Amino acid sequence: MRWSRSLLATLRDDPQEAEIVSHKLMVRAGLIRKLSGGLYTFMPLGLRALHKVSRIVREEMDRAGAQEILMPALQPAELWERSGRLATMGPGMFRLKDRAERLMALGPTHEEVVTELLAGEVSSYRQLPCTVYQIQTKFRDEIRPRFGLMRAKEFIMKDAYSFDTSLEAADVSYQAMFDAYVRIFRRCGLDARPVEADTGDIGGKWSHEFMVLADSGEDGIVDCPACGYAANQERAERADVPAADPECPPPAAVATPGARTIDDLTAFFGCTAERFIKTLIYLADGKPIAALVPGDRDLNEHKLKRLLNVKQLALADEATIENVTGAPVGFAGPVGLAIPVYADRALRGAADRTTGANKADTHLTHVALARDAAISAFDDLVVAGPGDACPRCGKPMQLKRGIEVGHVFKLGTKYTESFEASFLTDKGQSELMVMGCYGIGVTRTLQAVIEQSHDADGIVWPISVAPYAVSLLLLDPKDPTVCAVVDALEQALAARGIDVLVDDREERPGVKFKDADLIGCPIRVVVGAKGLAKGGVEIKLRTSKDVAVVPAERASVAIAEQAAALAAALDT
Ligand code: ATP
Ligand code: MG
């Protein structure tokens, strides 16, 4: 492609709203343009890179035996009612009505549509296993669309769904997708690692997220350097290390006027936060319960929700708290509370702690939890963090940040039950198909590549997903000899299947060099009158400072060799 005839425009300044480097670079390098919050147009260069990511995804899905289909983005809401998710998806799902007033949804995901489809198509065990996938636009009304393509309202996802005759067979399908994901991200030049993950709204039994480590990542990852355990912070467990406090005298009420928070209390009592027990009142499917965590820890609502096995969990409102504890907010405590109380298991054996007294402006000291309060269950209820003991090996764990680029789930029969998606076994019995689902954020993956691979001058594309393999800088566009060399080189490279962006603009060389670095194609080739007189064409890799000068007639071979070496390094 010739730059002078393209829509390509680079920008010198960062877009105002861009907070992370990959977002800034995507806009500055002319890959995307914003329509409005969470909505972006792919410009020619961005679309080329996106197509390369999609192609890798497609090749690996096909290789893993999945079949490509394409389902409608517009879905009747009735399907979502059947799975029970119309209520639980909440305002994150775009809803609209057709002219007959039928409620519709713009698909945020496709479990409902695909299960309905397979329920109709599959009748016998002979048709299974079956994995289908699509690469398609998804819609989610995100609370905070941001970071460019990372969290958009409309984005492209590859979603795959496996259907099997048994849990064991479903494990095989899951593993095939897991392995395909490892290859996809590696081929994209991404360092993405699988971590254990929460199953969230999609539901199901087990899941892994593929995380690209980056400081700008929205997810916390707790990992153990000693044994390799790694999990999303939403799910991460920690070893059971109960408190072993010595015995203490009976509880004593202490006036603590206005001291509601842990900070207030540490100042008031002059001791560390862990000596306090936080009491949080929740409504679990509408019923009040109390959850206790050490004063220096945060409660993990995912864990509490799993323990209680409820659909809805939310912090109680002020009126409920006053009603349940008999005290204003800030003075709740477990002693004498008439609702079920659940405590983090680090509090098993906790004694001589301070809690709220269920009385205004009052706390209780010398609380021995098991002695003084009725605890329904001790369980792992806090957000795991750095320094916590690994649940596998007991060594201290660390906290990192990551971008979720892919997610694989074992769903079991959650959806096949709702849609009566069954098959006949070899003995003629009817059984439900066992499902898995597998997503890759294709557009997010593209941006994650940039987040992980850039320098101060711009993007550093892995060749597999670069918009063009080669930036060919034509330094003297008015010099016919130089133009002839560039024309011949462009054709020779095209014949070898190497795509080239020719910068033929009437611009100073400095501008072209800067833009080539910003756009970040892996191989930069410079053709100018001076260079040709001195011996040929300059070839330089984006990742290196070394410049090789090659006679013009040998240039296409030399470039092809470089391109092949770069590609081979990614395809191991
Ligand atoms: P997140 O936790 O980041 O909101 P999710 O867990 O809701 O994502 P999934 O339902 O697992 O997302 O979707 C599969 C993949 O789609 C994710 O791994 C991610 O790469 C991508 N994705 C999800 N939401 C968005 C979004 N708003 N914009 C871009 N990509 C997204
Ligand atoms: Mg996910």
Image (cartoon, rainbow, N blue to C red):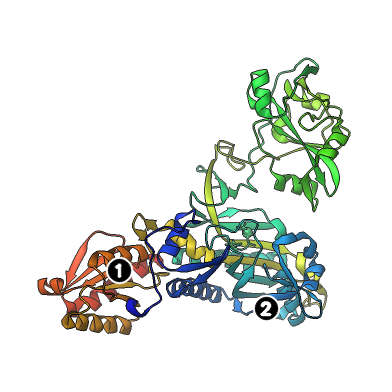
Please give the residue where the numbered disc 2 appears in the rendered image: 72
Residue at 18% x, 79% y is 482
Mark 1 or mark 2, which has the lower sequence index?
A: 2
Above or below, 481 against 207 in this view is below
Helix, strand, or loop for circle 2? loop
Quadrant of picture, ligand 2:
bottom right
Camera-side residue of 488 and 24: 24
Q: Quadrant location of residue 78?
A: bottom right
Determine whether, in the image, residue 439 is placed left or right of residue 41: right
* Residue 453 coordinates in the image, percent (x, y): 40, 58
Determine whether, in the image, residue 412 is placed left or right of residue 456: right
Q: Quadrant of the N terminus?
A: bottom left
Helix, strand, or loop for circle 1? strand
Residue at 46% x, 59% y is 15
What is the C-alpha distance between the residues marked 1 and 2? 40 Å
Identity of the amino acid at label 2? Answer: Pro
The label number, if any, that marks residue 523 in the structure image: 1
Above or below, 265 against 27 in this view is above
* Residue 293 coordinates in the image, percent (x, y): 71, 34
* Residue 303 coordinates in the image, percent (x, y): 71, 46
Identity of the amino acid at label 1? Answer: Ile
Above or below, 547 against 343 in this view is below
The label number, if any, that marks residue 22 in the structure image: none
Q: Quadrant location of residue 384?
A: top right
Determine whether, in the image, residue 58 is placed left or right of residue 266: left
Mark 1 residue's CB less than 8 Å from ligand 1? no
Above or below, 80 against 243 in this view is below
Does the image show residue 505? yes
Graded by Cα atoms within 10 Å as few (under 14), some (14 to 19) or many (20 or more), the crowding at tag 2 reads few
Q: Are marks 1 and 2 in contact (CB under 8 Å)?
A: no
Task: Please count the marks in the image.
Answer: 2
Q: Quadrant of the C terminus?
A: bottom left
